[in-house]
């Protein structure tokens, strides 16, 4: 007598495939969530390192770094000055003409600064949840900006009824590479933001281009991950959707009531990460009350 070999029927095979599909669908979000948790922790570590480095700079020079040089946007930012305290002194030493002018030497976008410094990408300044970008030639974007307070980048005395409450960072003192002292943060170092996340602009969008003075600072006038646009001084460096769907909203036409400013933004679900002036790292939800958020950015 011939034995019959049992095999799967077509229906049984389809059922097994469907079950596997359901299991994969259930598993993928968990895997993605675990990966984001790891990226978020790495970002927290970066901010913690930034906070510790700023304190080491303060211990060495009795002051924190300024946001940029006394002459503004284009001859160096805090990112160059903090590198020696992040085991990158050899790179920082190669930067030429920090705080100068066109009459005294090159800008951040000219050799040898591009060759030696601003073409470099630093892991400690880059959040792994974001996508890295080089907006101009090979110069790099990054993800952390210093706190310029609760109005615009220019630290306007008032902005649409919001009074500037001072900030822990500003331009350099005249003739120096120094910023403010922690003693000037009279609101308390645990209650004042030192630095916060920003999104890297994609394409030629300059958000996150922290070698450049304007993008080296964020303000808390807009809430975290705001649906309102950031304001860049010229349309050419603002690539708002639909020009580039990967970018958050922005405008390149600043006005007196809507001046240049960059909100804190991130790719983390639900909020942004920041480091306080005492070195502690926090996660701030998008739904934070706007007055609370602005108060955390003021230093008095």
Image (cartoon, rainbow, N blue to C red):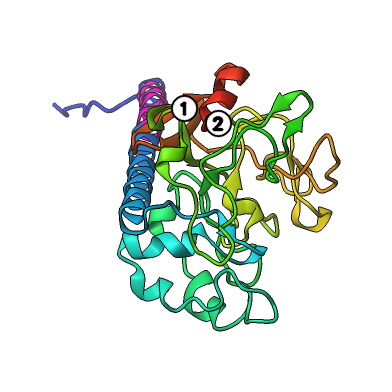
Mark 1, other Cα within 10 Å: few <14 / some 14–19 / many ≥20: some
- Residue highlighted by disc 2: 298
Q: Do labels 2 and 1 touch, CB within 8 Å?
A: yes
Which badge, 2 or 1, is on the more N-terminal residue? 1
Q: Which residues fall within the magenta stretch? A: 14-33
Q: Position of residue 59 (x, y in %)?
A: 31, 53
Q: Is residue 41 visible?
A: yes
- Left or right, residue 214 beside residue 78: right
- Determine which quarter of the picture holds residue 2: top left
Q: Position of residue 225 (x, y in %)?
A: 61, 31
Q: Position of residue 38 (x, y in %)?
A: 33, 39
Residue farthest toward the left in the current orientation of the protein: 1
- Determine which quarter of the picture holds residue 281: top left
- Residue highlighted by disc 1: 187
Q: Position of residue 17 (x, y in %)?
A: 39, 28
Give the residue drawn at x 40%, y 73%.
Answer: 91
Give the label, 2 or 1, closer to the camera: 1
Query: Element at badge 1?
Result: loop
Give the residue drawn at x 13%, y 26%.
Answer: 1
Magenta stretch encompasses residue 27? yes
- Left or right, residue 177 beside residue 277: right
């Amino acid at each position: 007598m011939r034995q019959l070999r049992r095999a799967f029927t077509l229906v049984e095979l389809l059922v097994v495939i469907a079950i596997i599909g359901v299991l994969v669908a259930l598993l993928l979000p968990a895997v993605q969530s675990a990966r984001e948790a790891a990226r978020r922790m790495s970002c927290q570590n970066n901010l913690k390192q930034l906070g510790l480095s700023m304190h080491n700079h303060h211990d060495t020079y009795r002051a924190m770094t300024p946001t940029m040089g006394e002459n503004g946007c284009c001859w160096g930012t805090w990112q160059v000055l903090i590198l020696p305290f992040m085991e990158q002194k050899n790179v920082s030493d190669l930067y030429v003409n920090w705080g100068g002018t066109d009459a005294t030497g090159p800008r951040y976008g000219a050799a040898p600064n591009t060759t030696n410094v601003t073409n470099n990408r630093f892991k400690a300044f880059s959040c792994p949840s974001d996508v890295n970008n080089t907006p101009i030639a090979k110069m790099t974007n990054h993800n952390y900006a210093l706190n310029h307070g609760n109005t615009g980048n220019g630290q306007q005395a008032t902005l649409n009824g919001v009074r500037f409450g001072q900030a822990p960072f500003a331009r350099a003192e005249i003739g120096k590479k120094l910023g403010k002292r922690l003693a000037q943060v009279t609101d308390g170092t645990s209650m004042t933001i030192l630095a916060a996340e920003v999104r890297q602009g994609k394409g030629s969008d300059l958000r996150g281009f922290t070698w450049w003075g304007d993008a080296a600072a964020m303000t808390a006038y807009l809430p975290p991950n705001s649906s309102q646009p950031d304001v860049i001084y010229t349309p050419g460096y603002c690539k708002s959707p639909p020009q580039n769907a990967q970018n958050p909203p922005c405008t390149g036409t600043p006005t007196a009531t809507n001046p240049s400013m960059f909100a804190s933004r991130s790719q983390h679900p639900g909020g942004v990460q920041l480091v306080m002036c005492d070195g502690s790292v926090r996660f701030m939800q998008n739904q934070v009350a706007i007055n609370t958020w602005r108060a955390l950015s003021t230093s008095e």
